[in-house]
Amino acid sequence: MATWNSRLGRAVGLTVALYVFGTVGWLFLVVALFNNNDVLGPGIAMGSPFYGIAFGILAIHESGVGWREAPRLMEWESTWVVFQAVAAAILFAATLATFDQRLGRMGKRVRKPSNIASRSRASRKPNELSEISVA
């Protein structure tokens, strides 16, 4: 986040806000939207790190949800792991692509030197002023 926001306070604030929404706010949003849906509600809510970990452990433990629900919940858990890994890879690639430009650094492109600059001093043609000799 700090790569794309030049002000440190703004970058920290946005990062904290996104983290709080992803962990706590996501659960409340899903509960509000999928309150009576026992199939989609728990699976979508597992996108929250708090609820995903807790419900994944409950799915494995037989006294929690029960073994008949465990395969479906493990599918949701695996889906969220893959989704979050892909999102992290995309953010990492975007950061690598824009890092130098956002910090004002030169890119990694190397210009091909021009003909005059690439020739050695001995192979250069003499200048008109240097051809004038003092007699």
Image (cartoon, rainbow, N blue to C red):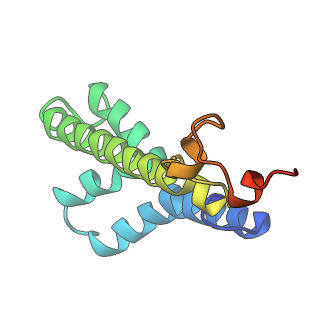
Quadrant (top left, top right, bottom left, bottom right) of the N terminus: bottom right
> In which image quadrant can residue 128 be found?
bottom right
Give percent across and percent down for residue 11.
69, 64
Residue most toward the front?
A: 135
In the shown orientation, is residue 98 left or right of residue 35? Answer: right
Between 64 and 73, which is closer to the camera in this rendering?
Answer: 73
Q: Residue at x 52, y 59 (%)?
A: 24
The answer to which quarter of the image holds residue 12 is: bottom right
Q: Is residue 43 above or below residue 53?
A: below
Q: Which of the 4 quarters of the picture holds residue 123?
A: top right
In the image, 71: left or right of 65? left
Q: Name the residue nearer the viewer: 12 or 96.
A: 96
User: x, y percentage for residue 110?
Assistant: 51, 46
Residue under the point 56% across and 51% down? 116
Q: Is residue 111 left or right of residue 69?
A: right
Residue at the spot x=68%, y=61% of the render?
104
Image coordinates for residue 102, horizontal then vertical, percent: 62, 62
From the viewer's perspective, tell me whether residue 85 is left or right of residue 66. Answer: right
List the single residue furthest toward the bottom.
33
> For this rendering, which residue is in front, 43 or 15?
15
